[in-house]
Image (spheres, grey):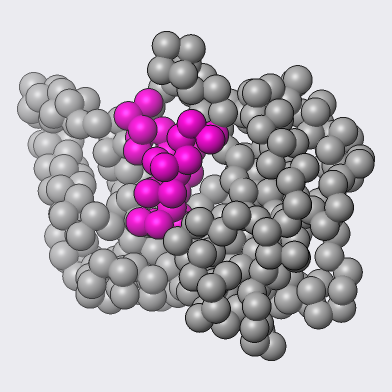
Amino acid sequence: MRFADIIGNAREKKALLNQAKENRISHAQLFLGPEGSAKLPLAIAYSGYLLCENPEPNDACGQCPSCQKIGSLTHPDLHFSFPVVLSATEKIASSDDRRSEWNKLLLKNPYFDINGWQQHLDELGKNAVIGVEESRHILQKLSLKSYSGKYKIMIIWLPERMNFQAANKLLKMLEEPPEQTLFFLLSDSIENMLATIISRTQLLKIGAFDTDDIARYIENKFAVDQAVSYSVAGLAQGNMVEAIQMVSGDENQHVYFDFFVKMMRTAYAANAFELMNLCDEIASLEKEHQKNFIKYGLHLFRESVILNYMKGELVNLRNEERFS
Protein backbone atom coordinates (compact mmCIF):
# COMPACT_ATOMS: atom_id res chain seq x y z
CA MET A 1 0.00 0.00 0.00
CA ARG A 2 1.24 3.46 -0.94
CA PHE A 3 0.12 6.95 0.05
CA ALA A 4 -1.47 7.24 -3.39
CA ASP A 5 -3.80 4.37 -2.50
CA ILE A 6 -5.26 6.28 0.47
CA ILE A 7 -7.95 8.77 -0.36
CA GLY A 8 -7.83 12.17 1.37
CA ASN A 9 -5.67 12.65 4.48
CA ALA A 10 -3.40 15.18 2.74
CA ARG A 11 -2.37 16.84 6.01
CA GLU A 12 -1.38 13.54 7.62
CA LYS A 13 0.56 12.39 4.56
CA LYS A 14 2.46 15.67 4.42
CA ALA A 15 3.37 15.48 8.12
CA LEU A 16 4.75 11.94 7.76
CA LEU A 17 6.69 12.75 4.59
CA ASN A 18 8.21 15.86 6.18
CA GLN A 19 9.47 13.76 9.10
CA ALA A 20 11.33 11.48 6.74
CA LYS A 21 12.67 14.23 4.49
CA GLU A 22 13.92 16.25 7.46
CA ASN A 23 15.40 13.16 9.13
CA ARG A 24 13.49 13.67 12.38
CA ILE A 25 11.61 10.40 12.63
CA SER A 26 10.66 9.62 16.20
CA HIS A 27 11.31 6.04 17.28
CA ALA A 28 7.80 5.85 18.77
CA GLN A 29 4.80 7.50 17.14
CA LEU A 30 1.19 7.47 18.25
CA PHE A 31 -1.34 7.60 15.42
CA LEU A 32 -4.45 8.79 17.25
CA GLY A 33 -7.73 8.93 15.38
CA PRO A 34 -11.36 7.86 15.56
CA GLU A 35 -12.66 4.48 14.47
CA GLY A 36 -12.92 4.28 10.72
CA SER A 37 -10.05 6.69 10.04
CA ALA A 38 -6.98 5.87 7.94
CA LYS A 39 -4.59 5.06 10.80
CA LEU A 40 -3.70 1.57 9.63
CA PRO A 41 -3.34 2.31 5.90
CA LEU A 42 -1.27 5.41 6.67
CA ALA A 43 1.07 3.45 8.96
CA ILE A 44 1.57 0.77 6.31
CA ALA A 45 2.12 3.34 3.55
CA TYR A 46 4.61 5.22 5.71
CA SER A 47 6.43 1.97 6.49
CA GLY A 48 6.58 1.21 2.80
CA TYR A 49 8.02 4.65 2.06
CA LEU A 50 10.71 4.26 4.73
CA LEU A 51 11.68 0.77 3.52
CA CYS A 52 11.44 1.53 -0.21
CA GLU A 53 14.66 1.05 -2.17
CA ASN A 54 13.88 3.83 -4.66
CA PRO A 55 11.50 6.25 -2.95
CA GLU A 56 9.88 9.01 -4.98
CA PRO A 57 9.61 12.55 -3.55
CA ASN A 58 6.18 11.93 -2.03
CA ASP A 59 5.63 8.19 -2.08
CA ALA A 60 7.22 4.76 -2.29
CA CYS A 61 8.05 3.62 -5.81
CA GLY A 62 5.69 0.65 -5.66
CA GLN A 63 7.95 -1.39 -7.92
CA CYS A 64 11.06 -2.42 -6.00
CA PRO A 65 11.29 -5.79 -4.18
CA SER A 66 10.74 -4.05 -0.86
CA CYS A 67 7.51 -2.42 -2.08
CA GLN A 68 6.32 -5.73 -3.47
CA LYS A 69 6.86 -7.37 -0.09
CA ILE A 70 5.08 -4.53 1.69
CA GLY A 71 2.18 -4.92 -0.71
CA SER A 72 1.85 -8.61 0.12
CA LEU A 73 2.53 -8.04 3.86
CA THR A 74 5.57 -10.33 3.72
CA HIS A 75 8.38 -7.83 4.33
CA PRO A 76 10.64 -9.26 7.07
CA ASP A 77 11.19 -5.81 8.62
CA LEU A 78 7.49 -4.96 8.94
CA HIS A 79 5.80 -6.51 11.96
CA PHE A 80 2.28 -6.30 13.36
CA SER A 81 0.85 -6.64 16.83
CA PHE A 82 -2.91 -6.68 17.37
CA PRO A 83 -5.55 -7.93 19.83
CA VAL A 84 -6.49 -11.61 19.81
CA VAL A 85 -8.79 -13.79 21.87
CA LEU A 86 -6.39 -15.81 23.98
CA SER A 87 -7.11 -19.53 24.01
CA ALA A 88 -5.04 -22.34 25.51
CA THR A 89 -7.10 -25.03 23.77
CA GLU A 90 -6.66 -23.44 20.33
CA LYS A 91 -3.06 -22.43 21.15
CA ILE A 92 -3.70 -18.73 20.54
CA ALA A 93 -1.27 -16.73 22.68
CA SER A 94 -0.20 -13.83 20.47
CA SER A 95 -0.92 -12.13 17.16
CA ASP A 96 1.58 -14.44 15.46
CA ASP A 97 -1.00 -17.19 15.88
CA ARG A 98 -3.52 -15.13 13.90
CA ARG A 99 -1.17 -13.58 11.36
CA SER A 100 -2.52 -15.47 8.34
CA GLU A 101 -6.09 -14.35 9.14
CA TRP A 102 -4.85 -10.79 9.72
CA ASN A 103 -3.08 -10.67 6.37
CA LYS A 104 -6.12 -12.06 4.59
CA LEU A 105 -8.45 -9.42 6.03
CA LEU A 106 -5.99 -6.56 5.59
CA LEU A 107 -5.28 -7.42 1.95
CA LYS A 108 -9.02 -7.61 1.26
CA ASN A 109 -9.91 -4.35 2.99
CA PRO A 110 -7.58 -2.09 5.02
CA TYR A 111 -10.51 -0.35 6.74
CA PHE A 112 -11.90 -2.36 9.65
CA ASP A 113 -12.41 -1.98 13.40
CA ILE A 114 -12.17 -4.42 16.31
CA ASN A 115 -15.69 -5.70 15.60
CA GLY A 116 -14.81 -6.31 11.96
CA TRP A 117 -11.63 -8.12 12.99
CA GLN A 118 -13.46 -10.34 15.45
CA GLN A 119 -16.31 -10.95 13.02
CA HIS A 120 -13.72 -12.09 10.49
CA LEU A 121 -12.57 -14.65 13.08
CA ASP A 122 -16.14 -15.51 14.12
CA GLU A 123 -15.31 -14.30 17.65
CA LEU A 124 -17.72 -11.41 18.14
CA GLY A 125 -18.46 -10.76 21.81
CA LYS A 126 -15.24 -12.31 23.08
CA ASN A 127 -12.50 -10.35 24.82
CA ALA A 128 -9.63 -9.60 22.44
CA VAL A 129 -6.45 -8.34 24.11
CA ILE A 130 -2.75 -7.87 23.58
CA GLY A 131 -1.30 -10.13 26.27
CA VAL A 132 2.04 -10.55 27.98
CA GLU A 133 3.15 -13.26 25.55
CA GLU A 134 2.79 -10.68 22.78
CA SER A 135 5.43 -8.44 24.33
CA ARG A 136 7.89 -11.34 24.39
CA HIS A 137 7.29 -11.93 20.69
CA ILE A 138 7.77 -8.23 19.93
CA LEU A 139 11.10 -8.15 21.75
CA GLN A 140 12.22 -11.31 20.02
CA LYS A 141 11.43 -9.95 16.55
CA LEU A 142 13.02 -6.58 17.12
CA SER A 143 16.20 -8.04 18.57
CA LEU A 144 17.02 -9.51 15.16
CA LYS A 145 19.13 -7.63 12.64
CA SER A 146 17.24 -5.65 10.00
CA TYR A 147 16.83 -7.65 6.80
CA SER A 148 16.92 -4.59 4.55
CA GLY A 149 19.58 -2.68 6.43
CA LYS A 150 17.06 0.05 7.10
CA TYR A 151 14.42 0.21 9.83
CA LYS A 152 12.64 -2.53 11.71
CA ILE A 153 9.04 -1.38 12.09
CA MET A 154 6.48 -2.61 14.61
CA ILE A 155 2.88 -1.53 14.01
CA ILE A 156 0.79 -2.02 17.15
CA TRP A 157 -2.91 -1.83 16.36
CA LEU A 158 -5.11 -0.76 19.30
CA PRO A 159 -2.45 -0.56 22.05
CA GLU A 160 -5.22 0.47 24.47
CA ARG A 161 -6.15 -3.23 24.52
CA MET A 162 -2.82 -4.22 26.08
CA ASN A 163 -3.12 -5.80 29.49
CA PHE A 164 -1.10 -4.28 32.31
CA GLN A 165 1.84 -6.68 32.07
CA ALA A 166 2.18 -6.26 28.30
CA ALA A 167 1.93 -2.47 28.57
CA ASN A 168 4.74 -2.35 31.12
CA LYS A 169 6.98 -4.46 28.91
CA LEU A 170 6.22 -2.19 25.95
CA LEU A 171 7.13 0.81 28.09
CA LYS A 172 10.57 -0.66 28.74
CA MET A 173 11.07 -1.20 25.01
CA LEU A 174 10.11 2.39 24.28
CA GLU A 175 12.53 3.62 26.94
CA GLU A 176 15.40 1.52 25.52
CA PRO A 177 14.46 0.78 21.92
CA PRO A 178 16.56 -1.58 19.79
CA GLU A 179 18.72 0.15 17.21
CA GLN A 180 17.00 1.35 14.01
CA THR A 181 13.58 0.35 15.35
CA LEU A 182 10.34 2.26 14.91
CA PHE A 183 7.12 1.76 16.86
CA PHE A 184 3.84 2.94 15.33
CA LEU A 185 1.01 2.76 17.86
CA LEU A 186 -2.44 3.07 16.26
CA SER A 187 -5.09 4.03 18.80
CA ASP A 188 -8.80 4.85 18.72
CA SER A 189 -8.62 6.28 22.25
CA ILE A 190 -5.81 6.88 24.73
CA GLU A 191 -8.01 6.77 27.82
CA ASN A 192 -6.97 3.19 28.66
CA MET A 193 -3.31 3.56 27.75
CA LEU A 194 -0.54 4.08 30.30
CA ALA A 195 0.29 7.77 30.58
CA THR A 196 3.97 6.85 30.61
CA ILE A 197 3.63 5.17 27.21
CA ILE A 198 1.82 8.18 25.76
CA SER A 199 4.52 10.52 27.08
CA ARG A 200 7.19 8.57 25.20
CA THR A 201 5.54 8.84 21.82
CA GLN A 202 5.22 11.56 19.24
CA LEU A 203 1.55 12.27 18.61
CA LEU A 204 0.07 12.42 15.14
CA LYS A 205 -3.66 13.11 15.10
CA ILE A 206 -5.52 11.40 12.28
CA GLY A 207 -8.75 13.08 11.28
CA ALA A 208 -12.01 11.46 10.20
CA PHE A 209 -12.63 11.19 6.47
CA ASP A 210 -14.41 13.96 4.61
CA THR A 211 -17.85 13.07 3.27
CA ASP A 212 -16.68 13.65 -0.30
CA ASP A 213 -13.71 11.32 0.19
CA ILE A 214 -15.90 8.52 1.54
CA ALA A 215 -18.40 9.00 -1.29
CA ARG A 216 -15.67 8.77 -3.94
CA TYR A 217 -14.16 5.69 -2.32
CA ILE A 218 -17.55 3.98 -2.09
CA GLU A 219 -18.36 4.79 -5.72
CA ASN A 220 -15.05 3.37 -6.98
CA LYS A 221 -14.86 0.38 -4.66
CA PHE A 222 -18.45 -0.84 -4.82
CA ALA A 223 -19.60 0.57 -8.17
CA VAL A 224 -22.68 2.29 -6.72
CA ASP A 225 -24.23 5.46 -8.08
CA GLN A 226 -23.45 8.88 -6.65
CA ALA A 227 -26.77 9.24 -4.83
CA VAL A 228 -26.15 6.05 -2.88
CA SER A 229 -22.52 6.87 -2.14
CA TYR A 230 -23.38 10.29 -0.71
CA SER A 231 -26.26 8.89 1.31
CA VAL A 232 -23.92 6.33 2.85
CA ALA A 233 -21.13 8.87 3.34
CA GLY A 234 -23.45 11.28 5.11
CA LEU A 235 -24.70 8.56 7.40
CA ALA A 236 -21.17 7.30 8.18
CA GLN A 237 -20.10 10.71 9.58
CA GLY A 238 -16.45 10.34 8.58
CA ASN A 239 -16.17 6.66 9.52
CA MET A 240 -14.97 4.65 6.53
CA VAL A 241 -15.56 1.34 8.31
CA GLU A 242 -19.23 2.14 8.86
CA ALA A 243 -19.60 3.34 5.28
CA ILE A 244 -18.24 0.04 3.96
CA GLN A 245 -20.45 -1.96 6.30
CA MET A 246 -23.53 -0.03 5.27
CA VAL A 247 -23.09 0.06 1.53
CA SER A 248 -22.95 -3.73 0.92
CA GLY A 249 -23.68 -3.23 -2.74
CA ASP A 250 -26.66 -0.98 -1.86
CA GLU A 251 -28.77 -4.02 -0.83
CA ASN A 252 -28.88 -3.25 2.89
CA GLN A 253 -29.72 0.40 2.25
CA HIS A 254 -32.93 -0.62 0.52
CA VAL A 255 -33.76 -3.12 3.30
CA TYR A 256 -33.29 -0.41 5.94
CA PHE A 257 -35.32 2.03 3.85
CA ASP A 258 -38.20 -0.43 3.53
CA PHE A 259 -38.12 -1.10 7.29
CA PHE A 260 -38.11 2.62 8.03
CA VAL A 261 -41.02 3.44 5.72
CA LYS A 262 -43.04 0.54 7.08
CA MET A 263 -42.30 1.60 10.66
CA MET A 264 -43.32 5.23 10.06
CA ARG A 265 -46.54 4.32 8.27
CA THR A 266 -47.48 1.75 10.90
CA ALA A 267 -46.79 4.23 13.69
CA TYR A 268 -48.85 6.89 11.94
CA ALA A 269 -51.72 4.43 11.66
CA ALA A 270 -51.36 3.65 15.38
CA ASN A 271 -51.37 -0.08 14.62
CA ALA A 272 -49.83 -1.46 17.81
CA PHE A 273 -50.08 -5.11 16.78
CA GLU A 274 -48.28 -4.50 13.49
CA LEU A 275 -45.61 -2.43 15.28
CA MET A 276 -44.91 -5.36 17.60
CA ASN A 277 -44.51 -7.66 14.61
CA LEU A 278 -42.18 -5.17 13.00
CA CYS A 279 -40.08 -4.97 16.18
CA ASP A 280 -39.77 -8.75 16.22
CA GLU A 281 -38.68 -8.67 12.57
CA ILE A 282 -35.98 -6.07 13.29
CA ALA A 283 -34.89 -7.99 16.41
CA SER A 284 -34.25 -11.05 14.23
CA LEU A 285 -31.55 -9.17 12.30
CA GLU A 286 -27.89 -9.60 13.21
CA LYS A 287 -26.59 -7.14 15.79
CA GLU A 288 -24.57 -5.12 13.28
CA HIS A 289 -27.62 -4.78 10.99
CA GLN A 290 -29.72 -3.62 13.93
CA LYS A 291 -27.13 -0.99 14.78
CA ASN A 292 -26.89 0.16 11.17
CA PHE A 293 -30.68 0.36 10.88
CA ILE A 294 -30.86 2.62 13.94
CA LYS A 295 -28.16 4.85 12.49
CA TYR A 296 -29.95 4.89 9.16
CA GLY A 297 -33.21 5.91 10.85
CA LEU A 298 -31.47 8.71 12.75
CA HIS A 299 -29.93 9.85 9.47
CA LEU A 300 -33.35 10.02 7.79
CA PHE A 301 -34.85 11.93 10.71
CA ARG A 302 -32.01 14.44 10.65
CA GLU A 303 -32.15 14.96 6.90
CA SER A 304 -35.94 15.28 7.00
CA VAL A 305 -35.68 18.07 9.56
CA ILE A 306 -33.11 19.84 7.40
CA LEU A 307 -35.31 19.37 4.35
CA ASN A 308 -38.29 20.94 6.13
CA TYR A 309 -36.52 23.90 7.72
CA MET A 310 -33.75 24.72 5.23
CA LYS A 311 -35.73 24.32 2.00
CA GLY A 312 -33.59 21.52 0.63
CA GLU A 313 -30.18 23.04 1.34
CA LEU A 314 -27.48 20.68 2.60
CA VAL A 315 -29.86 17.72 2.35
CA ASN A 316 -28.24 14.32 1.83
CA LEU A 317 -31.10 12.08 0.68
CA ARG A 318 -31.66 9.82 -2.29
CA ASN A 319 -34.72 10.47 -4.45
CA GLU A 320 -36.68 7.55 -3.00
CA GLU A 321 -35.92 8.81 0.52
CA ARG A 322 -36.78 12.40 -0.30
CA PHE A 323 -40.15 11.75 -1.92
CA SER A 324 -41.51 8.79 0.07
Residue 270 inside the magenta-drawn segment: no
In this rendering, position of residue 324 left or right of residue 56: left
- Coordinates of residue 164 in the picture (x, y in percent): 75, 21
Q: Is residue 178 visible?
A: yes
Q: Is residue 263 above or below residue 165?
A: below
The answer to if 101 sits in the magenta stretch is: yes
Above or below for 319 versus 201:
below
Q: Quadrant of residue 39?
A: bottom right
Q: Position of residue 97 (x, y in %)?
A: 48, 31
Q: In the image shown, does 238 or 29 lie closer to the viewer?
A: 29
Q: Is residue 73 above or below residue 154?
A: below
197 to the left or right of 224:
right
Q: Which residues are magenta?
A: 95-123
Q: Quadrant of the C terminus?
A: bottom left
The x and y percentages for residue 165 are: 75, 20
- Helix, strand or loop for the magenta stretch, by majority: helix
The residue under the point 82% across, 57% down is: 180
